[in-house]
Image: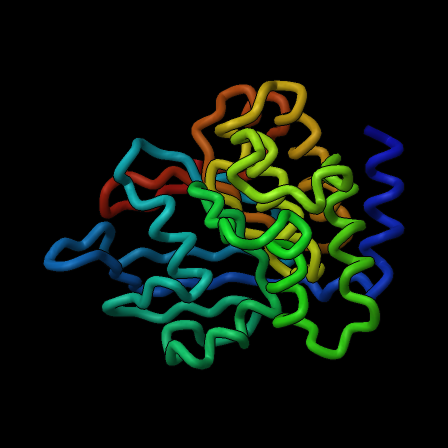
Amino acid sequence: MPELARRFGGWYRKLGVPAPGSIQLRNVTAGYGGINVFSDLALDVRPGEFVYLVGPSGAGKSTLLKVLYGTVRPRRGSVFVDGVAVHRLHSWQTGKIRRRVGCIFQEFELLAHLTALENVLLPLQLAHPRIHDPQAYALDALELVGLKDKANEYPQTLSGGQQQRVAIARAIAHQPRILLADEPTGNVDSRTSSEIMELFHQLNELGGTVVMATHDEYVLSRFPARTIELQPGLLEAA
């Protein structure tokens, strides 16, 4: 991985190393319909920190990441991500957080009618509308995850692991201050898992904040970092 780390470091500095981002939750309650997934959560993530979210299925790890990304609005409490009051944003204001945060969804959420390159390019252009030659940045991101040769392929022609890599390229292409990842190693083998984690740690070493939901014991043991356990309605630092 030294070569990957070197290339990633050089590429990531093209737009400048991002200012590290912090995360703060106070008395946050969130849920769906008439059910609260968690209540009165408090959480602090320091700028440039790497944090794992762990806990049983249904504890709210994915929901918490969606709250941080602005796709789920908390019912109560305050959420600050890189200085932005996410809990106050209207749906048409979510661009304020998307320019600062990259998110890797558990379900990939790639657009089926777009190629791998186009899936990476679209959010990059939305985050940086004035960027020069955005396609070059998107291709660099795909190369970093080993999929430059699949740039013109559509998601349905790619394996689950390849789709995961495209999702990672999409999340890092605009060089976010904060990276949120929901089970990013859940659909790949151990070798690919190690490559993904090396990439995340390189981003972290360059100043980016990483929050990753996982139940992957291999990752947790090989790449130790601060761990926060989420139980239904309860958040605990391990």
Q: Provide residue 212's location: percent of width, then percent of height.
A: 52, 42
Left of 139 or right of it: where is 60?
Answer: left
The residue located at (24%, 51%) in the rendering is 38
The residue located at (77%, 65%) in the rendering is 134
Left of 5 or right of it: where is 228?
Answer: left
Left of 37 or right of it: where is 222?
Answer: right
Task: State whether residue 196 is above or below residue 46.
Answer: above
Q: Provide residue 235's location: percent of width, then percent of height.
A: 34, 46
Residue 30 visible in the picture: yes
Dividing the picture into quadrants, the one containing residue 16 is bottom right
Query: In the picture, which quadrant includes the C terminus?
Result: top left
Left of 80 or right of it: where is 128?
Answer: right
Task: State whether residue 120 is above or below residue 57.
Answer: below
Colour scheme in the image?
rainbow
Instruction: Please count the marks in the image.
Output: 0
The residue located at (77%, 41%) in the rendering is 148
